[in-house]
Image: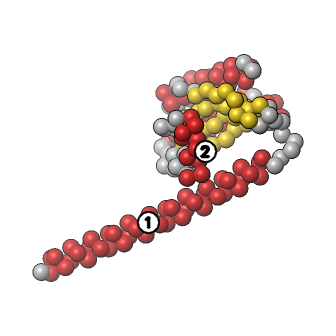
């Protein structure tokens, strides 16, 4: 009888802790989504930015491994190092997007994202036009030099291929 009662109490505690963690996690994700949304809206009001540009998106989940973090860091550094004038004048932009956040679910459907992904998107008059997924990025993620060269070549070909 004591064993049954002890097991019941343990199971109830487990359920309470699980529900509490779920509520905490959802609240945290909603807060992060609001911050991302506020930052995005603030960036859209910048009238000095050109209306024709390209964006290199890095899509990721909330939980990331070392290779995922390296993909982001190396892609961003590739833009800053190999395309500094385009980044400076706003014709080439960087954006990382957490696809686990509810406000970003539209990207999953739009680009058919299933895992960490690099996508370059062209905008004309602030409207999205053509885009390309950098399919080999994930395969090269742990080979830094090849990854950087691949990203540089793909971005260059996409941007120059107006």
Q: Quadrant of the C terminus?
A: top right
Q: Which residue is drawn at the image coordinates 32% and 73% (left, top)?
A: 13
Foreground of the two, 13 or 84: 13
- At a point 57% along the width and 27% down the height, the residue shown is 134
Q: Earlier in the sequence, mark 2 or mark 1?
A: 1
Provide the secondary structure element on which disc 1 rests: helix
Q: What's the CA distance linking mark 2 and mark 1?
A: 24 Å
How many marks overall? 2
In the drawing, does residue 95 fall left or right of residue 138?
right
20 sits to left or right of 124: left
Q: Is residue 81 visible?
A: no
Given the current orientation, which residue lies at the most extreme right position? 48
Q: Position of residue 100 (x, y in %)?
A: 52, 49
Q: Quadrant of the N terminus?
A: bottom left
Vertical comparison of 107 with 62: above or below: above
Instruction: Say few, some or many: other residues with alpha carbon within 10 Å of mark 1 (under 14 / 14 to 19 / 20 or more).
Output: few
Badges 2 and 1: C-beta atoms under 8 Å apart? no
Name of the residue lying farthest toward the bottom: 2
Answer few, some or many: residues within 10 Å of disc 2's Cα (few below 14, many 20 plus, some between 14 and 19): some
Q: Which quadrant of the figure has residue 71?
A: top right
Tell me if residue 105 can be seen: yes
Q: Residue 130: give x, y in percent of width and height.
A: 67, 27
Q: Residue at x 72, y 18 (%)?
A: 161
Q: Nearer the viewer, residue 162 or 80?
A: 162
Image side of residue 95 versus residue 61, left or right:
right
- Name the image quarter holding residue 118: top right
* Pointer 1 residue: 21
What residue is pinned by disc 2?
97
Frontmost residue, 144 versus 141: 141
Residue at the image position 78 percent from the left and 47 percent from the top: 44
Residue 66, position as x, y percentages in the image: 50, 42
């Amino acid at each position: 009888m004591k064993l049954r009662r002890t097991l019941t109490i343990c199971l109830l505690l487990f359920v309470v802790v699980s529900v509490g963690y779920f509520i905490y996690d959802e609240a945290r994700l909603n807060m992060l989504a609001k911050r991302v949304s506020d930052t995005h809206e603030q960036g859209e009001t910048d009238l000095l930015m050109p209306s024709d540009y390209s964006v290199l998106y890095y899509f990721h989940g909330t939980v990331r491994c070392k290779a995922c973090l390296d993909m982001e860091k190396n892609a961003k550094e590739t833009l800053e190092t190999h395309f500094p004038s385009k980044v400076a004048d706003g014709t080439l932009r960087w954006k990382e997007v957490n696809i686990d956040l509810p406000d970003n679910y539209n990207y999953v459907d739009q680009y058919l994202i299933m895992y960490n992904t690099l996508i370059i998107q062209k905008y004309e008059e602030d409207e999205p036009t053509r885009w390309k997924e950098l399919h080999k990025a994930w395969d090269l993620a742990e080979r830094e030099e090849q990854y950087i060269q691949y990203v540089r070549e793909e971005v260059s070909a996409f941007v120059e291929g107006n």
